[in-house]
Image (cartoon, rainbow, N blue to C red):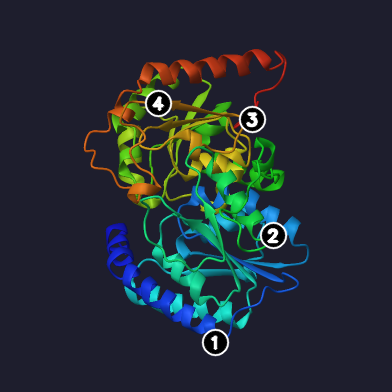
Amino acid sequence: MRIATMRWIDRWAGVPLVAVLVGLHRLWWLIAPPRRPETIRRIAFLGLSELGSTIIADPAVRRARDLFRGAELFYVIFAGNRGSLGMLGTIDSQRVLTIREDDVLGFILDSLAVVRRLRRRRIDVVVDLELFSRYTSILSLRSGAPIRVGFHRFHAEGLYRGNHLTHPVQYNPHQHMAKNFLALVHAATEEPGIVPHSKRRFEDAEIRLEPYRDAAASAMLRSRLAHAFPVLARTRSWIILNANSSHLIPLRRWPLENFGQLARRLLDDPDVAVLITGVAAERVDAQEIARMAASERVIDLTGLTRLDELPALYALCAMMLTNDSGPAHVAALTGLKTWALFGPETPALYGALNPNAEFIYKGLACSPCVSAANHRRSPCTDNQCMKQITVEEVFARMRGHLDTLERQRPPDRPRTAGERF
């Protein structure tokens, strides 16, 4: 199902449906007012959207595990994003509830099935991680959970999502989304009636990710890649170029010709191989980058690696350049040196939780132009915020890092394919 179709349904069907369901819920509340459970045994998170958002939310999910010891954690997510939870390992795979997003009938049937399962399991707390989706607001309301936590507009001119939350939280556009998600979890620990909930400060140390450690998986992947692409065995520094930005916000894309020029300059170093990643649908763009670079040391991996293999791949590489998209957040699990290109959105809110990440952001007067207030839609047709990032400045940073890594390598150390310095 196209994202434009989902937004249309969410607006024109979601608003009246939320209004009706909230009215019915209030009538039922008068008849049988819910009681706060004495012990929180089951918590469900509603986080359907992008891969990056799932990873950014993981510190909050782990905080819920710590605050509510012994509670079962469930997660509702689009089927296409399920692999992101598998990489994180925080949620038991048996408690991941998926909804197909590729067709309307599957979407409806899975939605009904998710509601039935949540109600059957008697969820105590539902945490809606979405900022503007009426759909997840409906799932929250229909879950049957006596404690419902989510972002609320209060007096802001925000999007209408109903007034059914028992613990409404103020979305703060001036702090990282990971801290906003932490506020949702802490709200569930408080008594209802606080306006808004979570009147506390969150430190940067609280939004760190659990590091990825699987040397065996990386070794197997290294062997597989070196067998499929023998040139990789002759190079020491593997560099990832990720030119995609997902279909949600195409404005986040750096011009494709820039990736080609950058690849050509990086390949002036005979010890460098450039790996282009992405899903199979992005192979045309990858092949165009390879054509512009014109080198056997450009490896097109689009469609050849699974989502759950990305951390193992990143653990083998020296660095990555990526548009603001999911791979930047996956790389944070490994600590890979990453440069992420920002324009329509701001790294202050959505930067990867990676101490080794740098964000290249021009900060134009019109940027960021997508936010929760406009449903992440922009009238822009000329993303100068991305186009003004030059190949020269990106190359200078990456070449400087390569030089630093080379100086740090012992002179007598043997060369290793795909070596992480």
Q: Earlier in the sequence, mark 4 or mark 3?
A: 4
Residue 87 vertical placement versus 420 (above, below): below
Whether tag 3 and tag 2 are in contact, CB under 8 A, the answer is no
For the residues labelled 3 and 2, the Cα–Cα distance comes to: 42 Å
Q: Which is in the foreground here, disc 3 or disc 1?
A: 1
Q: Earlier in the sequence, mark 4 or mark 1?
A: 1
Q: Earlier in the sequence, mark 3 or mark 2?
A: 2
Residue 163 vertical placement versus 330 (above, below): below
Within 10 angstroms of label 2, few (less than 14), some, or many (20 or more) residues?
Answer: some
Q: Earlier in the sequence, mark 3 or mark 1?
A: 1
On the question of residue 114 being in view, the answer is: no
Name the residue carrying label 4.
263
For the residues labelled 1 and 2, the Cα–Cα distance comes to: 26 Å
Side of 182 where 129 appears, left or right: left
For the residues labelled 3 and 1, the Cα–Cα distance comes to: 63 Å
Name the residue carrying label 1.
31
Name the residue nearer the viewer: 88 or 170: 170
The label number, if any, that marks residue 420 in the structure image: 3
User: Of the residues shown, which amino acid type is indicated by label 3?
Assistant: Arg
Name the residue carrying label 2.
189
User: Of the residues shown, which amino acid type is indicated by label 4?
Assistant: Ala
Residue 230 vertical placement versus 75 (above, below): above
Name the residue nearer the viewer: 61 or 267: 61
For the residues labelled 2 and 4, the Cα–Cα distance comes to: 50 Å
User: Of the residues shown, which amino acid type is indicated by label 2?
Assistant: Thr
Q: Which is in the foreground here, disc 3 or disc 2?
A: 2
Q: Which is in the foreground here, disc 1 or disc 2?
A: 1
Please state, as top left, top right, bottom left or bottom right, where the C terminus lies in the image. Answer: top right
